[in-house]
Image: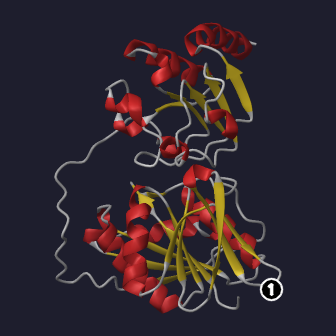
Amino acid sequence: MSKSILIVAEAEGGRLVRMVSDLAAVACGLVGGAAGSVVAALSGPPGTAGLAKELWPHGVSVAYVAEHPLLGELRPETHARAAAAAVQQAGPSLVLVGQTLLGRDMAPYLAARLNTSVLMNATELRRNSSGEVEVVCPVYGGSVRAVYTVSESPATVVGFQPGVAVRGEAVAGGARQGQVVSVDPGLGGFQSKVKLVNRATTAGPRLEEARVIVSGGKGLGDKKNYAYIEDLAKVVGGMPGASRAIVDLGWATRAQQVGLTGKRVSPDLYMAIGISGASQHMAGCSTSKVIVAVNRERDAVIFKYARYGVLGDCLEFLPSFIEECRKLKAG
């Protein structure tokens, strides 16, 4: 692969999202640290170019920056136009997009504008024995891994799941000072097909960025028992999650839902409490580094994914477990 790899560096609220460092690490891992091999597309409202300096420690040598007032909103169609302009100017062999709320919708838009293919839910980028680039994507809830071979021309767009690399770490040998190149996003006279009606806000960090997640399912038996999940998450320094089943029942919020139709997460530790392990749920958490399951059903599918399992009623297990965790935390 002689060309560069371009990462889409998403910014929100005046800062780069955490997945940017993940994508940079994946790209640098493939090119082996060759100078000038990793570049970035950065788009946002006027003033966004100031964020480019945060890319240099992660091995990015050139930032193609598009600024426009319309890019202040998280609309996939506008950011896809900006990223496409950057790709056309940079001429990379691969384009990596983080599957954030924006990225999941933007990647297909971007591929369509570039008239190229798109692969989603990737967890690994590697070379085979022939030197070809392979993309690994879990399918069927993570029970099977599909391996795709991609070509350099035209550049394939690859959407990566959260947590694909060590977060927040600078790349050894990363450029101290890179180059900023201005890009025209082509938004003059643009009329969006999407109208922003209301912006939902949530307090605290995002579930996708949590290193520890404690999720509850219907095995909790009642809405009031979700308090155990919240208590345990607080004690272990994590965030509470939920299966779609209990979100539909109103026990937890949509922002806490993990799964195919919810958040896709990849924390260091994922605790599944009273969750059976249906493919819809596992599609959102199967790439977690360590999964711990608590379920009273011996044949529950979740145990096939779990490194550690507790066979028993979660309502009998949780009170004493939370208390022991508190004691350990207190020292």
Give the quarter of the figure containing the N terminus.
bottom right
Q: Position of residue 117 (x, y in %)?
A: 48, 81
- Kindly identify the residue that appears in the image at 46 percent across and 68 percent down: 50
Mark 1 is surrounded, within 10 Å at the Cα level, by few (under 14), some (14 to 19) or many (20 or more) other residues, namely few
Question: Which quadrant of the structure image shows residue 245?
Answer: top left
Residue bearing mark 1? 130
> How many labels sit on residues?
1
Of 296 and 326, nearer the camera is 296
Secondary structure, mark 1, is loop
Of 8 and 113, nearer the camera is 113
> In this orientation, does residue 57 appear?
no
Q: Position of residue 219 (x, y in %)?
A: 50, 20
Give the quarter of the figure containing the C terminus.
top right
Give the residue at the far right of this rendering.
129
- Kindly identify the residue that appears in the image at 50 percent across and 49 percent down: 264
Of 186 and 231, nearer the camera is 231
Q: Position of residue 300 (x, y in %)?
A: 61, 30
Q: Is residue 137 left or right of residue 85?
A: right
Q: Is residue 246 left or right of residue 90?
A: left
- What colour-coding does the image apply? secondary structure
> In this orientation, does residue 103 appear?
yes
Q: Is residue 110 left or right of residue 200?
A: right
- Kindly identify the residue that appears in the image at 74 percent across and 14 percent down: 328
Of 28 and 193, nearer the camera is 193
Q: Position of residue 198 (x, y in %)?
A: 19, 48
